[in-house]
Image (tube, rainbow, N blue to C red):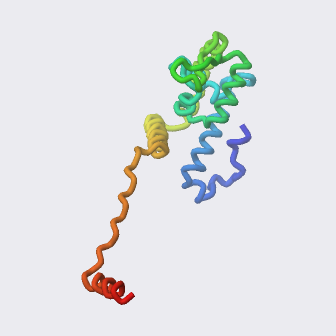
Amino acid sequence: MAKTKSNDKSGKGLPALDRSPSHLLHRALQLALDIYGDELGAGAITQRQYAVLAAVEAHEGLTQTDLVKITGIDRSTLADMAARMIAKGLLERQRSSSDARANAVSLTEAGRLALEDARPKMAKADARLLKLLGSNKREALVGALRDLVRAGEEAADPPAEKPPKAEKPKKTDKAEKSKKKKLKKAA
């Protein structure tokens, strides 16, 4: 749990960091991962592996691209994770029936057992984390985090915009046109 321990013994923190949502989310994530590690123990599936297994269980036959969208794990990391989880016997992969270029992923029996074993421990980790807040703030935190994730997804995938209209050439006034005609005649 060394990651979440603060070196600042004064309890005052740094004002700029104490007001930084990105820094505070990072620190909260470190705390959550430490609690998760305590609850699941050494050698257990990681929190991200849990997310992948839970997503695959909920939607058997997802493609790895679908898993990227659902879990928020970037494409290359997810591909590497899937390969390791296949090697461990937690997942199996086959070509998607709807897109021959994509791999569909499904749980193996070992993956299902790992998920079943981890599920109550994950619930306990979540409960421990939320217990650090007053009961009136728990739902608000989860709701705010959900809203933040959804807003970020929508911002990352904005609706297609219409291309800007081409500018029409500016109309010239009569005096300018008259000058141009005189120059042409003179040339």
Considering depth in this image, is 187 or 171 the residue closer to the camera?
187
Q: Nearer the viewer, residue 74 or 167?
A: 167
Query: Residue shown at 30%/78% (left/top)?
Result: 172
Q: Quadrant of residue 110?
A: top right
The image quarter in which residue 122 lies: top right
Quadrant for the N terminus in the image: top right
Q: Report the residue at 41% width, 45% height from top.
A: 160
Q: Position of residue 51 (x, y in %)?
A: 59, 27
Residue 55 in percent (x, y) is at: 54, 23
Instruction: Identify the residue at horizontal 40%, vertical 44% (top origin).
Output: 159
The single residue placed furthest to the left in the displayed view is: 174
Residue 118 appears in which quarter of the rendering? top right
Please, which residue is most extreme toward the top here?
109
Horizontal side of residue 91 vs 155, given as left or right: right
Does 48 sit above or below residue 14? above
> In the rendered image of this protein, does residue 80 appear above or below residue 119?
below
Q: Which percent across, then down, holds residue 86? A: 69, 19
In the rendered view, tell whether residue 122 sits above or below residue 32.
above
Residue 124 shows in this picture: no
Left or right: 4 with respect to 159? right
